[in-house]
């Protein structure tokens, strides 16, 4: 009915002209006292023929409407469905559409080339910066003082941010190297924990770790990144002398929690959003709001699930649901 209404509005002028001409003929016959049957009969025949042609026109109008709707859905890819123009105005509109489409493709190609160059640059930069970081680590190993240990922890933070950059670049890459296999979860957890051993010691944070005895179907490198991010946050937002725990109460559900400052109730639903830092982010100026966002993206790709529970002032618990059996392992 909506399409019919549009068709009527577009042809209102023609309908009015037809009725105007009919009225002129009828009025002329009446003024000259001529038999009205002589004009009413042709007017009736013309009205029937006009209605027939009007309905035929609506049929083709509907077909063209459907073609344009299909074109609207496919115009991002190709203009092949464009029908042959029947009027000069249609041809001119199609010429404008084709010109805009070609310009859009040119801009898309330029933007893709710029994006590729940018990705390549930052990927090379992330790999190159690892060399001076490794060199500084070697230099600091020769000096076992409180100051050198503090510098070492700072370097580890830099390493973590570099890994975040690489992870961010790889996530949308078509060449992301996922290698799904069955792995011992405890071995991956221990790798992550060892990376933060000095921070646990320096800040006197107690680690409560219970062996999981669980085999997980995942990618080791990407899951390790997630665990490191979660443990890093647990340490960052814990008070000195606090506690961080890692345990598996339910099969396949890994819990990583702390007794730190917690997350405000209004922030909790949004902590996995890109760039969202919330109240804690305003307190900690170094917070980027990227770490948990990357964790959620990676878990989605690995078909794991990450959720959080927290109470302000009583700590936060991150839950990793590692139950996954959809893909064959290598």
Image: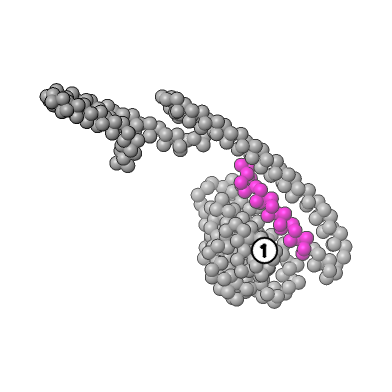
- Image quadrant in which the C terminus is located: top right
**Magenta residues, dominant SS class:** helix
Q: Which residue is mark 1?
A: 287
**Residue 106 showing in the rendered view:** yes
Q: Is residue 216 visible in the rendered structure shown here?
A: no
Report the coloring of the rendering: one colour
Q: State which quarter of the image contains the N terminus.
A: top left
Residue 60: in magenta span: no
How many numbered marks, from 0 up?
A: 1
- Decide: is 266 above or below 24: below
Return the x and y of residue 240 as percentages of the image width and height.
Answer: 70, 75
Identity of the residue drawn at 50% across and 49% down:
326
Closer to us: 20 or 120:
20
Quarter-of-image position of residue 8: top left
Closer to the camera, 270 or 67? 67
Residue at the (45%, 28%) spot, across then down? 89
Q: In the image, is residue 172 part of the stretch drawn in magenta?
A: yes
Choose top left, top right, bottom left or bottom right for residue 115. Answer: top right
- Which sits in the foreground, 267 or 18? 18
Which structural element holds mark 1?
loop
Task: Find residue 80 and report its horizontal and vertical position in percent.
Answer: 48, 28
Magenta part of the protein: which range?
153-179
């Amino acid at each position: 009915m909506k399409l019919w209404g549009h068709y009527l509005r577009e042809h209102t002028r023609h309908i009015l002209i037809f009725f105007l001409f009919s009225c002129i003929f009828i009025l002329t016959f009446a003024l000259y006292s001529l038999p009205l049957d002589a004009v009413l009969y042709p007017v009736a025949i013309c009205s029937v023929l006009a209605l027939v042609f009007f309905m035929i026109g609506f049929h083709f109008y509907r077909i063209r409407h459907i073609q344009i709707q299909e074109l609207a859905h496919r115009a991002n890819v190709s203009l092949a469905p464009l029908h042959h123009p029947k009027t000069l105005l249609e041809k001119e509109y199609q010429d404008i559409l084709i010109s805009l489409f070609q310009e859009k493709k040119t801009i898309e190609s330029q933007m893709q080339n710029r994006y590729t160059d940018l990705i390549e640059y930052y990927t090379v930069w992330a790999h190159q910066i690892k060399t001076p970081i490794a060199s500084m680590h070697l230099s600091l190993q020769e000096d076992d003082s409180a100051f050198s240990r503090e510098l070492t922890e700072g370097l580890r933070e830099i390493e973590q941010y570099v890994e975040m950059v690489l992870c961010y670049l790889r996530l949308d890459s078509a060449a992301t190297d996922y290698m799904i296999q069955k792995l011992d979860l405890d071995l991956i957890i221990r790798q992550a924990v060892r990376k933060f051993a000095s921070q646990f010691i320096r800040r006197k944070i107690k680690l409560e770790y219970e062996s999981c005895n669980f085999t997980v179907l995942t990618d080791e490198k990407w899951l390790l990144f997630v665990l490191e991010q979660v443990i890093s946050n647990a340490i960052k937002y814990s008070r000195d002398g606090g506690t961080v725990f890692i345990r598996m109460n339910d099969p396949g559900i890994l819990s990583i929690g702390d007794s730190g400052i917690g997350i405000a109730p209004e922030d909790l639903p949004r902590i996995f959003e890109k760039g969202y830092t919330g109240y804690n982010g305003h307190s900690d100026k170094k917070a980027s709001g990227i770490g948990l966002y990357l964790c959620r993206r990676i878990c989605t790709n690995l078909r794991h699930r990450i959720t959080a529970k927290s109470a302000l002032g009583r700590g936060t618990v991150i839950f990793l649901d590692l139950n996954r059996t959809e893909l064959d392992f290598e």
